[in-house]
Image (cartoon, helix red, strand yellow):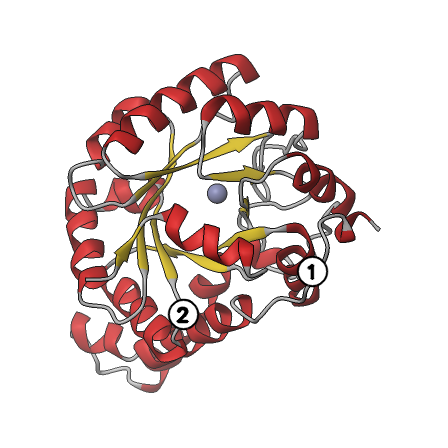
Amino acid sequence: MTAASLAQVLDQAAAERRAVAGLVVLGWEDARAYVEAAEEAGVPVILQAGPGCRRHTPTPILGRMFRMLADAASVPVVCHIDHARTRDECSAALDCGFTSVMIDGSNLPLDENIALTAAVVEEAHAAGISVEGEVGVVGYSHGAASRASDPGEAARFARETGVDALAVSAGNIHLSEAKVTRIDLPVVAAITAVTRVPLVLHGGSGIPWEMRRRLAQECRVAKFNIGTELRMAFGSALRAHLEANPGTYDRIEILAATATTLRAAARDIIAALWRPGQAADEASCAR
Ligand SMILES: [Zn+2]
């Protein structure tokens, strides 16, 4: 019985200068592989059902699937909804197994984002469920533009909403296929200085490893969302198997052939993010 809330996992991670991987799940096979990877590494993991996943599979099925895996796991597993845009989406997730929701009001004016997020926090916390909010806009590679988080707005957002985790925009971008993302460290440092809420970076696949470590150890970034990196590992393994086995047609057999690769890739990410932090002082990432 190790389903955990986002707050439980991130508060510990932030205090110990570690980070937890928020892994983008698209179905049963990858969800199972990620939990097995976390068990092999002996560290917590966050399973995330994003908008694409929820369009493909009904949210209640995903919630119960995540929860079944979490309850049977030997490590803490957070069952998380990623990028919900409405209060109704969050409300619907509260009673089907999820332990955490992200309400993404980043497309709204700040006052409306705060009001929406605060309402979700009130309802979710009453049910014992954590909430992640977003301030600023994390854009998409070849898509919507980003708007960097303003530290003053971030402080107000955290204070007035009561969120358990705060997603910020500082150069990170969704769906980046190359590790070339340049993080604006002073922006993250300025936000770290004005709130105690653990920070989240979406678009983690594009962030080089040395920067991931610095952000976790020096800036209290406690959650990195990782999707593209694992989708690429899955796709490569799938192509290799099909090219080597042109007579294979069974879905279960084909997908099973990707499991070892996917599990190993996830284990490496999960374990590296959870590396013990250094005894950094509060303002060190500003230097
Ligand atoms: Zn995201």
The answer as to whether callout 2 falls within 8 Å of ligand 1 is no
- Left or right: 45 with respect to 15? left
At label 1, the amino acid type is Arg
Mark earlier in primary sequence (2, 1): 2
Horizontal and vertical percent position of residue 155: 62, 28
**Image height check: is 133 above or below 206?**
above
Residue drawn at x 46%, y 24% as measured from the top left: 161
The label number, if any, that marks residue 214 in the structure image: 1
**Residue at image mark 2:** 43
In depth, the one of 29 and 75 nearer the eye is 75
Quarter that holds the N terminus = bottom left
Q: Residues within 10 Å of mark 1 (few under 14, many from 20)?
A: some
Q: Position of residue 150 (x, y in %)?
A: 69, 28
Residue sitting nearer the eye, 264 or 277: 277
Q: Are marks 2 and 1 in contact (CB under 8 Å)?
A: no
In the picture as drawn, the residue positioned furthest to the right comes out as 287
Residue 260, picture quadrant: bottom left
Q: Is residue 5 visible?
A: yes
- As drawn, the label of residue 120 is none
Element type where label 1 sits in the image: helix
Q: Position of residue 76 (x, y in %)?
A: 32, 62
Of residue 224 and residue 265, the one placed in the foreground of this image is 224
Question: Is residue 274 depicted above or below 93 in this figure?
Answer: below
At x 47%, y 50%, the residue is 11
Q: Which residue is drawn at the image coordinates 26% and 38% (left, top)?
A: 128
Report the front residue among 191 and 89.
Answer: 191
Label 2 amino acid? Val
The answer to whether 192 is drawn above or below residue 266 in the figure is above
- Residue that appears at 65% across and 61% down: 179
Image coordinates of residue 279 in percent, x first then y, are 68, 64
